[in-house]
Structures are given as C-alpha cells and as structure tokens.
Image (cartoon, helix red, strand yellow):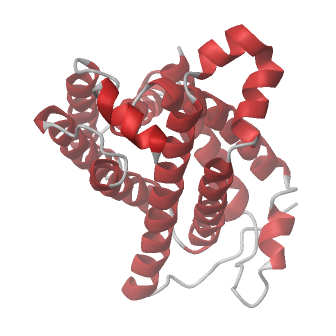
Amino acid sequence: MILGLVALCAPLGDSCLSRGMARLPAITLAHPASLVAAVFTPWIAVGIALLIGFFASYLTALSWADLTFVLPATAFGNVIVALLARFWLQEPISLERWAGIVLITVGVGFVAHGPSLTERPATAIAEEQAR
Amino acid sequence: MTIPFPSAQPSLWAATAMIAAIVLASTAGEVLTAAAMKSIGDLDEIRAHSGLKGAIRAVVTCPLFFAGVSFLALAFFSLLFALNHLDLSLVAPASASLTLVTNAVAGKLFLKENVDRRRWTAAVLVCVGVYFLAH
C-alpha cells in the first residue's frame, strides 16, 4: 500500500510539473526568482501536492526498509503510468516500451523477493549507538 | 491563455550538467533522508505509541532529515530548471535510472546496506527498463 502510493504519486507529480514548466517562458540562472514564482502556478501546485503525498509515503517506507529496496520498488510507477496510457488513454506502446515494462517488472520482482531490511548483529548496533 | 515559449535546445554538455546536478543532489538527499529515517526508527510503531503528532515531531526534530531535505530541494529546483530547457522524456528517465545506480553505490558505501547480487541485478534491470520505457 505504502510502496504503491510512492509508485503512483511520483510519476503523476512529475507529469504535472512537466506540463506546468513547459507552459512557462524559458527561465535563466540570471533570474532565479522566476523559479520560485513558478511554484504558485496551478499545474506546478498540483504536482507539488502529489509530490508531498509521495514524500510522506516514501519517508514511512524508508523507516522500515533499505533505500536500495525502496527505490527499485518505486520505479514500478513508470510501468503503471505506461499501462494507464495504453489502456485508458489508448496510446500506442512500442516494442521497446513493452521491453522496458517487462525489465522493470522483473527487476522489482527480484528485489521484492529479498529481505527489505539489512539485518545487523546486536553488537554492531550497540557500537554505533555508543559512538 | 499561456502561449508555449519556444526555447533553443541546450548543448550536450549543458544537458549533461543539468542531469548530473539532479542526480548528485538527489543521491545526497536520499542517502541523508534514509539515514535520518533509520536513526528515528519505524514510523508506524512511533505513530502507534505517540500518535501522528509524535511521528511528525520525531521526523522534524532530526537534523539529518533537514540536511536530506535541503539536498532534495536542491534536486527539485535543478529538475524544474532542467524541465524548462529539456524534454521530460529525457530528463525523467535519465535522472531516475542514473539515480538508481548512484544510490545503490551510496547505499553500500554510506548506509552499509547489504547490496547483494539480487539488488544489483534489480537496479540494473530497472535502470535499463526505464531507459527503454522513455524511447
């Protein structure tokens, strides 16, 4: 459930950011304040709301699982977005994209079958806390 | 009505620098955030004992968390900047797949995570998969 929220909110949030930023004039390093102003435009604001949902779920996942477990698992969001585009928006998916979907699914399956957290001996934890 | 502004495509070096900035800032942010969450403990357990406010307090009083969030904010603004100059279909998969690999290395080096053959295989498969998905 938590990893599902992470996987769904991140790509949807990125898509909203992309749509919002593409509608703005080109921003240069000479005017960094315009980046801050972009935050208050509707698409960017929705994107940020989705990314806040992503971050809350992501922090919860990191509190009980390794970073190297959480990150590949959350990449499954790319597959969800591609499948939504195919079956909901009726967008065509090329052979390369199907290959990408299969590779990500197999990769997530690989990591999901292993332990989610690195087990450490009690002595090592005690040493770390004593430092 | 907002009219899309036509911008010149940046050079290969500029595109590489923009993506590298996102990858480096996001790797530093994710490693620091993961270290912070490990030092805090299981948030579900904290919430069961001290409620939602207790869980939020545990997170926001951790200095490592703020260091991580600062780098993630830097990565976010680097992403906004890159999206303004490059296509999402290049920026999102390139930064996501490279970040997976740099995080696997950083997780092993700094967080002492057990990145075994299974996790390396998963990282590489997902990395190549994200690349294919974007083309």
Q: Is residue A4 above or below residue B126?
A: above
Q: Provide residue B1's location: percent of width, then percent of height.
A: 88, 60
Work out whether residue A72 can be spotted.
yes
For residue B115, side relative to residue A28 (left or right): left
Toward the front, the furthest residue is A130
A96 lies above or below B8: above
The total of numbered circles placed on residues is: 0
Q: Is residue B109 above or below residue A46?
A: below
Left or right: B121 as drawn, with respect to B31: left
Residue drawn at x 15%, y 32% is B118
B107 sits to left or right of B42: left
Which of A115/B49 is in front? B49
| Quarter-of-image position of residue A37 | bottom right
Asked if one can make out residue A8 in the rendered structure from this viewpoint, the answer is no
Residue A59 horizontal side relative to residue B55, left or right: left
Residue A24 location (% of width, % of height): 76, 68
Q: Nearer the viewer, residue B73 or A98?
A: B73
- Where is residue A10 drawn, in percent x and y? 56, 39
For the point 65% across and 78% down, the residue is B6
Q: In this rendered view, identify the residue nearer to me: B75 or B85.
A: B75
Check the image and name the residue furthest to the left: B117
Q: Hey, which residue is sitting farthest top in the picture?
A: B48
Report the residue at 56% width, 43% height from top: B36
* Residue A42 place in picture, x, y as percent: 84, 48
Q: Residue at x 58, y 26 (%)?
A: A60
